[in-house]
Image: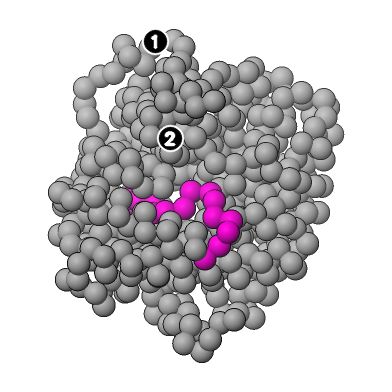
């Protein structure tokens, strides 16, 4: 039971500290939609999504109204489309028709985004996988709410460097096709190592093949709540610091658990997981970077940043797993540059560099996220950055990801404005030296020795 003190604390977190449920994401399996006829396949996909998710948005709004808990996004994730379209799609253009169907279905049910225009190629690409990957620039430039992801590596399989090389080119092409919107298409494309099957956050969400027919996953967020709590223990020792973060994460996760169980009950869809990631927004006071500063850094990126982030991530997880038996997804702390005002400030004054961000990804939830880079950055350099981040995930047995945005026509010192939750970002400098010969090698990087745990 929730007592009056806990109720008042929750109200304060919502009204004053930017606590929200960032997303209710319904995962939907499309495996039973598979058909060798492309037109029939598209019909099956549209029918299943619009039937299964018909009441998702209205249910979310009902829960918001009844409990007074903001639910910012309602989203859908689907089975990786490279698998679903393998039989019917004979070209990249065929896959683009499925992207259009996903877009129409998502708009029909009223969700903010639909994820799962994805391929899983950690050891190699099938013909279907390659067709989907090559279709991504056209798919993302011709749709509004479709999100795409490609998993190119894992601790068990190594890294598919052919896919890494191809995705450098794909990101460049996506940037070119959406250059009139400051290359916004790249904000809807994530490259993963060790991608989880149950992530509710975009742009990387997909409904894994290990999941059931449908599932409800909820992502909570509360950077502002954590920062406010830490303000009350300023100057205290590390034990007090850690306990404060852990207890706050517990309270935040309980809110998500309540929403998840209610959504599951009302929709008649099983509850999957709570993703308790601290997901920042451009709103003042809703920043992971500000938490790091409250811990004791002048700016995010200062010496000690990686240690402070490791501490934060660990305590968030410890608090969350006490609040819910089903914690999954990514869970921890996100460090997207454009979506976090504190990160933006640190990048603008030079405290935060791409190399420092890469170091921070060793201990955070995901990786190099929503980073704007010069539009002239070569495809091989983008592939090299992806390869570095995938190696961190592979060796450390964790999820890592890259969401880079080469903004066509803009360079270091300029700013790009994406709007909404995507925020704005300074164009960050990229190491100018070439990795072309490395990226041009064919094949894959083998799995590390510690992957053999049978």
Of 28 and 332, the residue lying toward us: 332
Q: Please give the name of the residue rendered at 40% of the width and 70% of the height, measured from the top-left corner.
A: 248
Q: Is residue 332 above or below residue 147?
A: below
Magenta-colored segment: predominant secondary structure:
loop
- Find out whether residue 100 is within the magenta segment: no
Q: Quadrant of the N terminus?
A: bottom right
Crowding at label 1, few (<14), some or many (≥20) Cα neighbours within 10 Å?
few
- The image shows residue 184 at horizontal and vertical percentages of 45, 44
Range of the magenta residues?
Answer: 323-339
- The image shows residue 443 at horizontal and vertical percentages of 46, 12
Where disc 2 sits, the SS reads loop
Based on the displayed image, in which of its 4 quarters is residue 242 positioned? Answer: bottom left
Looking at the image, can residue 365 be seen?
A: yes
Q: Please give the name of the residue rendered at 30% of the width and 55% of the height, measured from the top-left corner.
A: 311
Based on the displayed image, in which of its 4 quarters is residue 168 positioned? Answer: top left
Of 254 and 173, the residue lying toward us: 254
Crowding at label 2, few (<14), some or many (≥20) Cα neighbours within 10 Å?
some
Q: Is residue 427 above or below residue 439?
A: below
Whole-number angstrom distance, CA of label 1 to CA of label 2: 24 Å
Looking at the image, can residue 167 be seen?
A: no
Q: Is residue 410 left or right of residue 92?
A: left
Q: Quadrant of the C terminus?
A: top right
- Say which mark, if any, is on residue 397: 2
Q: Which residue is mark 1?
A: 441
Mark 1 or mark 2, which is nearer to you? 2
């Amino acid at each position: 039971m929730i007592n009056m003190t806990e109720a008042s604390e929750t109200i304060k977190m919502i009204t004053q500290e930017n606590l929200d449920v960032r997303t209710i994401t319904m995962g939907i399996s499309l495996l039973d939609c598979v058909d060798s006829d492309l037109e029939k396949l598209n019909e099956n996909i549209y029918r299943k999504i619009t039937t299964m998710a018909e009441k998702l948005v209205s249910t979310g709004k009902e829960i918001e109204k009844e409990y007074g808990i903001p639910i910012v996004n309602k989203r859908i994730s689907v089975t990786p489309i490279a698998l679903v379209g393998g039989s019917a799609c004979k070209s990249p253009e065929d896959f683009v028709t499925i992207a259009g169907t996903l877009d129409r279905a998502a708009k029909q049910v009223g969700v903010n985004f639909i994820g799962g225009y994805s391929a899983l190629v950690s050891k190699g690409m099938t013909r279907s996988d390659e067709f989907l990957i090559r279709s991504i620039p056209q798919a993302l430039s011709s749709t509004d709410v479709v999100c795409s992801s490609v998993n190119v590596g894992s601790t068990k399989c190594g890294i598919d460097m052919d896919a890494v090389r191809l995705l450098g080119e794909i990101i460049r092409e996506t940037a070119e096709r959406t250059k009139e919107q400051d290359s916004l298409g790249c904000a809807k494309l994530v490259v993963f190592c060790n991608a989880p099957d149950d992530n509710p956050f975009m742009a990387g969400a997909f409904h894994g093949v290990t999941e059931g027919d449908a599932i409800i996953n909820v992502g909570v967020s509360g950077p502002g709540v954590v920062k406010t709590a830490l303000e009350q223990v300023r100057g205290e020792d590390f034990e007090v610091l850690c306990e404060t973060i852990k207890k706050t994460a517990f309270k935040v996760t309980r809110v998500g658990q309540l929403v998840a169980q209610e959504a599951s009950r009302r929709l008649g869809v099983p509850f999957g997981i709570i993703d308790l990631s601290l997901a920042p927004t451009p709103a003042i006071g809703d920043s992971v970077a500000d938490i790091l500063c409250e811990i004791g850094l002048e700016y995010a990126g200062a010496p000690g940043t990686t240690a402070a982030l490791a501490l934060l991530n660990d305590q968030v997880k410890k608090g969350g797993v006490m609040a819910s038996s089903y914690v999954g997804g990514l869970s921890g702390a996100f460090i997207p540059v454009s979506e976090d005002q504190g990160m933006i400030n640190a990048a603008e004054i030079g405290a935060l560099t791409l190399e420092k961000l890469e170091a921070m990804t060793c201990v955070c939830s995901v990786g190099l996220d929503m980073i704007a880079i010069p539009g002239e950055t070569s495809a091989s350099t983008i592939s090299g950055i992806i390869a570095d981040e995938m190696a961190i995930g592979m060796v450390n047995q964790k999820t890592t990801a890259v969401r880079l945005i080469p903004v066509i026509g803009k360079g270091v010192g300029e700013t790009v404005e994406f709007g909404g939750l995507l925020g704005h970002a300074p164009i960050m400098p990229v190491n100018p030296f070439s990795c072309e010969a490395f990226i041009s090698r064919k094949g894959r990087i083998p799995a590390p020795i510690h992957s053999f745990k049978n």
